[in-house]
Image (cartoon, rainbow, N blue to C red):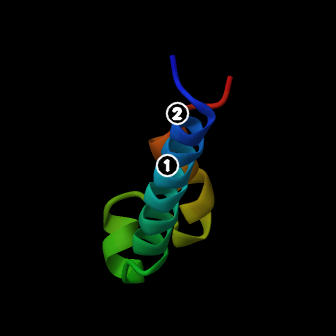
């Protein structure tokens, strides 16, 4: 069973992964992003789905 501290630690790690992923997607050069089929303006949504999973 998780303690409260473990839950906060896991949440902080997930948020750090989300921020890092979001920032990396947002910083992609436009030509590279478009070649990958990614619009940098969707960085928040893409990173959220990658870290926290697809919303129901």
Tell me the quadrant of the picture where the C terminus can be found: top right
Between disc 2 and disc 1, the foreground one is 1
Q: Residue furthest top?
A: 1
Q: Position of residue 15 (x, y in %)?
A: 55, 55
Q: Earlier in the sequence, mark 2 or mark 1?
A: 1
Viewer-proximal residue, 15 or 29? Answer: 15
Q: Is residue 14 visible?
A: yes
On residue 32, the disc is: none
Reply above or below: 6 against 33: above
Q: Quadrant of residue 30?
A: bottom left
Name the secondary structure under disc 2.
loop
Q: Residues within 10 Å of mark 1 (few under 14, many from 20)?
A: some
Q: Is residue 49 visible?
A: no
Reply above or below: 28 against 55: below
Viewer-proximal residue, 20 or 12? Answer: 12
Residue drawn at 57 percent across, 31 percent down? 54
Q: Are marks 2 and 1 in contact (CB under 8 Å)?
A: no
> In whole angstroms, how far apart are the C-alphas of marks 2 and 1?
11 Å
Q: Position of residue 10 (x, y in %)?
A: 49, 42
How many dots with numbers? Answer: 2
Name the secondary structure under disc 1.
helix
Residue drawn at 31 percent across, 74 percent down? 32
Residue drawn at 50 percent across, 57 percent down? 18
Residue at the disc numbered 2: 53
Q: Position of residue 50 (x, y in %)?
A: 45, 44
On residue 14, the disc is: 1
């Amino acid at each position: 069973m998780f303690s409260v501290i473990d839950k906060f630690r896991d949440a902080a790690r997930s948020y750090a992964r989300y921020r890092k992923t979001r920032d990396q997607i947002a910083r992609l050069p436009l030509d590279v992003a478009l070649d990958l089929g990614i619009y940098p303006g969707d960085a928040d949504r893409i990173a959220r789905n990658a870290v926290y999973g697809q919303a129901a």
